[in-house]
Image (cartoon, rainbow, N blue to C red):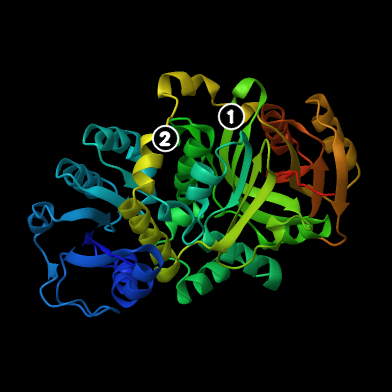
């Protein structure tokens, strides 16, 4: 097979960048044999040229000089692996202006500045490939953009943050407190020293913004997404929910509602224990998609880590080199913000079932009180659970599940429950998400 050599520039030699360099250098022969493309790592730029990395670069490849990369006309594809947004945004704009195609795993950048960068790429007749930005080694972006093009995507339910899934899995299996499960995740490398963006839902929101934009064909803004994290989740609620047949996950949800309106949200969700996503444990990711023709499809795999993410980055490099990414990027049409904004449903408009836990004084009138308050707001009770025994303040936990109601009704009811004298403190409320599944 006649090989075509493609020279690659890489900026950032951290975890992801090192994995990318490792794949290109160590698997180059196999890639060339399969594709006819010989990837040559021509220039690697990093502020730190002294630290030891898990990859041995060829002599003279590593430099601190970004202009060396930008000015080398023989380098046609650049990988941005620096992370963050401001510097990375400026860097990508310079790469595009220099005539480079871009491959990135930078989810925050694509979510926050993707629309601007896409326009810049088209103005410079270049492309941006971002498969690795959403779910590590899971090829979800290419599946939506290519394999599922014939479908109208009507629903997306994803576990897209391995840190949160690991924490919730351990809280469920071991009855651990949140702080204990988080510390273990950090010890094993599944959580950062500062895990804020993971546990507060921001990371999942970034990924949802990207996936929803290409699935729906909309210019999505992070402001369109309602976000709740898992910081306040109690092992008690996980246990009580489990007794009622549910498993707790942090879900990224995109739903097409009536008249093409869309609900985009990230929040802790109780889902049925026998659902496919409930069986996704530890640091793994999974995305369940619903298409008008194909029905339900489930994508599962490692959503982060050096080599899974590097796998997606290098696959993008190959796709750009073959011309596939350029063609699909050229035909990526997104409805502009002026038309999209009116279609985004606010959180108050969504309909859901709910799990509620109140701490009640152990005296007559509890059932009558919560029944009356929920009824006043048009909320029908589906089930209730109360354990014997008293808490340290003389209260007992009462768990209630509801039938479907609007969020605005539930918000009003929670305010009234908190004011009721027979209950102590603010109620806990977690949405119950019924994920439709294809079953014969």
307 on left or right of 358: left
Q: How many marks?
A: 2
Residue at image mark 2: 332
Between 247 and 132, the residue placed more toward the observer is: 132
Residue 111's x, y, as percent? Answer: 39, 42
Name the residue that disc number 1 marks.
Answer: 262
Between marks 1 and 2, how big is the CA–CA gap? 20 Å
Q: Secondary structure at mark 2?
A: loop
What is the number of the mark on residue 16?
A: none
Q: Nearer the viewer, residue 404 or 69?
A: 69
Quick check: 69 above or below 193? above
Q: 150 left or right of 134?
A: right
Give the residue at x 48% y 23%.
Answer: 340
**In the picture provided, is 99 more to the left or to the right than 35?**
left
Residue at x 86%, y 59% (from the top left corner) = 387
Mark 1 element type: strand
Dot 2, crowdedness within 10 Å: few (<14), some or many (≥20)?
A: few
Return the disc, 1 or 2, that comes first in the chain's sequence: 1
Camera-side residue: 2 or 303? 2
Indicate the position of residue 83 as horizontal and vertical percent values.
Answer: 30, 55
Q: Residue at x 62, y 28 (%)?
A: 348
């Amino acid at each position: 097979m006649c090989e075509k050599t493609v020279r690659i520039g890489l900026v950032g030699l951290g975890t992801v960048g090192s994995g990318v360099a490792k794949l290109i250098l160590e698997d180059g022969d196999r890639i060339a044999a399969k594709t006819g493309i010989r990837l040559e790592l021509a220039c690697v730029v990093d502020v730190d040229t002294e630290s030891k990395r898990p990859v041995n670069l060829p002599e003279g490849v590593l430099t601190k000089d970004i202009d060396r990369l930008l000015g080398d006309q023989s380098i046609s594809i650049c990988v941005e692996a620096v992370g963050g947004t401001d510097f990375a945004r400026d860097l990508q704009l310079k790469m595009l202006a220099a005539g480079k195609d871009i491959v990135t795993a930078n989810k925050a950048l694509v979510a926050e500045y993707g629309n601007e960068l896409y326009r810049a790429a088209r103005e410079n007749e270049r492309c941006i490939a971002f498969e690795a930005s959403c779910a590590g080694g899971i090829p979800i972006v290419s599946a939506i953009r290519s394999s599922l093009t014939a479908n109208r995507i009507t629903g997306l339910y994803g576990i897209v943050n391995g840190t949160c899934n690991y924490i919730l899995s351990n809280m469920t299996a071991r009855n651990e407190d949140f702080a204990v499960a988080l510390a273990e995740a950090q010890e094993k490398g599944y959580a950062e020293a500062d895990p804020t963006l993971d546990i507060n839902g921001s990371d999942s929101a970034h990924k949802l913004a990207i996936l929803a934009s290409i699935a729906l064909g909309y210019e999505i803004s992070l402001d369109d997404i309602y976000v709740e994290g898992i910081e306040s989740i109690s092992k008690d609620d996980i246990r009580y929910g489990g007794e009622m047949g549910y498993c707790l996950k942090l879900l990224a949800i995109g739903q097409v509602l009536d008249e093409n309106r869309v609900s985009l949200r990230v929040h802790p969700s109780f889902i049925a224990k026998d659902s496919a996503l409930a069986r996704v444990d530890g640091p793994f990711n999974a995305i369940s998609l619903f298409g008008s023709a194909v029905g339900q499809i489930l994508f599962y795999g490692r959503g982060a880590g050096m080599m899974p993410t590097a796998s997606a980055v290098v696959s993008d490099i190959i796709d750009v080199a073959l011309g596939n990414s350029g063609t699909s990027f050229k035909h990526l049409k997104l409805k502009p913000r002026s038309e999209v904004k009116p279609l985004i449903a606010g959180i108050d408009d969504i309909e859901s079932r709910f799990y509620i836990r109140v701490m009640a004084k152990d005296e007559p009138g509890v059932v009558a009180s919560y029944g009356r308050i929920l009824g006043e707001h048009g909320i029908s009770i589906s089930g209730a659970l109360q354990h014997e025994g008293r808490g340290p303040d003389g209260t007992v936990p009462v768990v209630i599940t509801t039938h479907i109601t609007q969020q605005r009704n539930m918000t009003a009811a929670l305010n009234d429950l908190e004011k009721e004298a027979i209950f102590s403190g603010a109620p806990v409320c977690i949405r119950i998400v019924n994920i439709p599944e294809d079953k014969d």
